[in-house]
Amino acid sequence: MFVEKTMDTKQTTAIELKRLSRWLDSSIRLPGGMRIGWDGVIGLLPGVGDLAGLAISSYIIFSAAKLGASKLAILRMVLNVVLEAAIGTIPIAGDLFDMAFKANNRNMALLDRHTQDPRKVTTQSRWWLLGWLTILFAIFVFVVWLVVRMLAGLLAWLF
């Protein structure tokens, strides 16, 4: 008797997520070989486009969590999408960044690496997050220092 091999649910979900990610980030070939996706095109619609892209990207992240990605990997995925969405709100430059950054493809590559070696990806994500937190803290300290210097200069000028 012939028994047909079927993929399990996780494999099917991963394949569907890859397909969705490719559609969002790299399904349209431009002259010169560069690829963009429908996320970048939809993002050209002011306000609504960025929210739609964020919603679809969130679906990919929730699905990755259901597939068993670690909390650190999920947090890294969230930060990829938040970065793309935040910068994507800047007219024109943000849209170009959105088309080049490809957060969904990055997240799917991260999920693929996670299925191959979860410990390695979790460790890498921990260092990646620590690096970004360090950079953000340094920027925060610099901004506070700058504001204090400006206020001190303003007060010295006034008095």
Image (cartoon, rainbow, N blue to C red):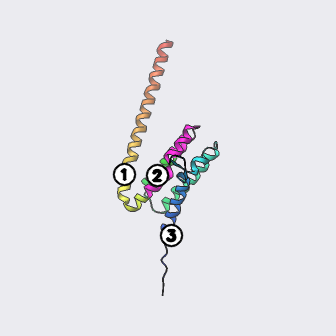
Left or right relative to 127: residue 10? right
Tell me the CA gap for discs 3 and 2. Answer: 22 Å
Which residue: 48% across, 21% down? 151
The residue labelled by disc 1 is 124
Residue 101 covered by magenta stretch? yes
Q: Nearer the viewer, residue 130 or 32?
A: 32
Specify which label sits upstream in the sequence, 3 or 2: 3
Q: Secondary structure at mark 1?
A: helix
Residue 66 covered by magenta stretch? no
Circles 1 and 2, Cβ within 8 Å, touching? The answer is no
Tell me the CA gap for discs 1 and 3. Answer: 27 Å
The residue labelled by disc 3 is 9
Q: Secondary structure at mark 3?
A: helix
The magenta region covers 82-111
Which residue: 38% across, 55% down? 121
Magenta stretch, overall SS: helix
Specify which label sits upstream in the sequence, 1 or 2: 2
Neighbours of disc 2 within 10 Å: few (<14), some (14-19), many (20+): some
In x, y percent, where is residue 64? 49, 59
Tell me the CA gap for discs 1 and 2. Answer: 14 Å
Mark 2: which amino acid? Answer: Arg
Neighbours of disc 1 within 10 Å: few (<14), some (14-19), many (20+): some
Q: Nearer the viewer, residue 71 or 107?
A: 107
